[in-house]
């Protein structure tokens, strides 16, 4: 459920007409509903209230400080994958003891910052990383709490670019090799084994892969405990999908009901890393129609948002519903909705049936709260767009639109080019 709805033919975010926001901040812009963010987080969190658990929001989905701060106030921890995300999490007031550090390529400076901050644990993804973390922790005189990300070789049946739990993926350590890695970790003097981690992928619409993974992990945890290792945390990762078009992902309560029986057998604190399922349908991208054109083959609707603003359609072939901000009765056409970037891959939709648009009117690209702004770029020297949060009837700009000066900030021309 979200709080983007039509009232008398006009699309609103909570109690604010989207047209009014566009008049105040210009287009394109990302728009988030406060009430939707709160609702989605609470529903997910409450689904697991029967077991000790910690919800660590997956920051890569959307790392705006205001959104992070909102989740912190609701008791969330953070799942980070870089030093920059650690910085953002702490800037938003996150409790370091609720931060888990994932990712296959942690640098030593990032490890140092995380150790000094006192994070909950590192989700380690290779034996070499274990040894490097041990060295860094030793220099600091700190014990590094670790879990090992175990790759259970399970097909999560999602897009190949966002599946992470199979042997051909770069993530984690194969479940058959995991015992050896845990033995290495237990022997290294500056590491403390505290948990086990598993992440299957993103945009999963079936709970069976989670259940299958838990059954495999249970046998591994039993073996590790027999060898005297303490497993206090079971990190099940994230990955639960949302509805973009006709998908029917499980509700968080359905997801929880299917995995809780397995989880309770672990006698661990459960860590969950939801991202898309919390923010995906809580945000939209608002864009303005610039031109329309057609040839013998196609019709095109050219808007001021582009693949640099929302890359998912170009990158994954992803579907995002596109709705007119002003709904009325008019002819429908089939068209490609495209942006101004000089790439044929610059599209938000292809062959989409939409109301015949007029130049200057607004469209809402739905389900854009996850992996929207966080994956945006300055390609074609386009300033990144504004981000706005609505709370009831209040409009809050939570990121200013970049200007041309922002595009060249940090760049310089050497003297030999100025005075040849």
Image (cartoon, helix red, strand yellow):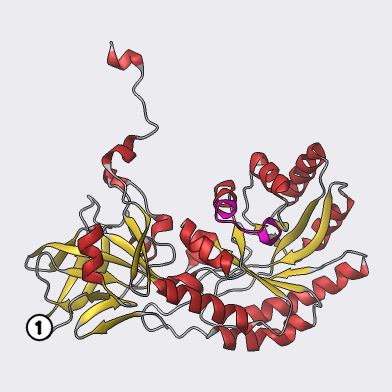
Residue 63 seen in the figure: no
Q: Which image quadrant for residue 52?
A: bottom right
Q: Residue 272 at x, y = what percent?
A: 64, 71
Residue 235 seen in the figure: yes
Residue at 75% across, 51% down: 127
Left or right side of 97 for 317: left
Q: Which residues lie in the magenta part?
A: 89-99
Residue 89 in the image: above or below residue 282 = above
- Quick one: quadrant of the N terminus? bottom left
Residue 94 shown in magenta: yes
Residue at 54% across, 75% down: 41
Q: Residue 115 at x, y = what percent?
A: 72, 47
Q: Residue 375 at x, y = what percent?
A: 42, 56
Q: Nearer the viewer, residue 389 or 254?
A: 389
Q: Point out the residue furthest to the top here.
A: 420
- Crowd rating for badge 1 (residues with CA inside 10 Å; few <14, some 14–19, many 20+): few
Q: Which image quadrant for residue 320?
A: bottom left
Q: How many marks?
A: 1
Residue at 75% across, 66% down: 196
Q: Which image quadrant for residue 19?
A: bottom left
Residue 84 shown in magenta: no
Left or right side of 115 for 67: left
Q: Secondary structure at mark 1?
A: loop
Residue at 31% across, 51% down: 401
- The residue carrying mark 1 is 330
- Quick one: quadrant of the C terminus? top left
Q: Residue 27 at x, y = what percent?
A: 23, 59
């Amino acid at each position: 459920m979200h709080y983007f709805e039509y009232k008398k033919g006009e699309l609103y975010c909570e109690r604010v007409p989207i047209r009014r926001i566009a008049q105040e901040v210009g287009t394109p812009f990302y728009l988030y509903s406060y009430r939707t963010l709160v609702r989605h987080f609470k529903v997910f969190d409450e689904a697991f209230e029967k077991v000790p658990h910690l919800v660590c929001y997956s920051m890569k989905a959307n790392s705006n400080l205001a959104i992070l701060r909102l989740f912190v106030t609701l008791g969330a921890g953070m799942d980070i994958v870089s030093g920059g995300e650690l910085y953002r999490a702490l800037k938003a007031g996150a409790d370091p003891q609720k931060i888990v550090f994932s990712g296959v390529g942690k640098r030593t400076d990032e490890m140092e910052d995380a150790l000094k901050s006192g994070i909950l644990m590192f989700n380690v993804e290779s034996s070499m990383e274990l040894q490097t973390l041990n060295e860094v922790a030793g220099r600091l005189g700190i014990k590094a709490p670790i879990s090992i990300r175990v790759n259970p070789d399970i097909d999560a049946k999602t897009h190949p670019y966002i599946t992470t739990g199979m042997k051909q993926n770069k993530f984690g350590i194969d479940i058959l090799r995991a015992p050896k890695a845990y033995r290495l970790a237990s022997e290294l003097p500056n590491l403390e084994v505290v948990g086990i981690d598993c992440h299957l992928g993103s945009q999963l619409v079936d709970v069976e892969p989670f259940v299958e993974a838990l059954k495999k992990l249970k046998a591994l945890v039993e073996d590790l405990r027999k060898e005297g290792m303490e497993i206090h945390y079971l990190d099940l990762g994230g990955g639960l999908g949302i509805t973009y078009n006709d998908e029917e992902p499980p509700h968080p309560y359905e997801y929880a009901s299917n995995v809780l029986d397995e989880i309770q057998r672990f006698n661990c604190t459960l860590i969950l890393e939801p991202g898309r399922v919390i923010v995906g349908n809580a945000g939209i991208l608002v864009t303005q129609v610039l031109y329309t054109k057609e040839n013998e083959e196609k019709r095109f609707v050219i808007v001021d948002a582009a693949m640099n603003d929302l890359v998912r359609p170009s990158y994954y072939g992803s579907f995002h519903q596109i709705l007119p901000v002003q709904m009325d009765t008019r002819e429908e056409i089939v068209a490609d909705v495209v942006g101004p970037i000089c790439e044929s891959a610059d599209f938000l939709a292809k062959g989409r049936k939409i109301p015949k648009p007029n130049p200057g009117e607004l469209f809402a690209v739905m389900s854009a709260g996850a992996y929207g702004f966080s994956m945006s770029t300055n390609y074609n020297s386009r300033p990144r767009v504004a981000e706005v949060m609505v709370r009831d009837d209040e409009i809050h700009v939570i990121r200013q639109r970049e200007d041309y000066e922002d595009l060249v900030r940090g760049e310089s021309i050497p003297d030999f080019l100025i005075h040849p």
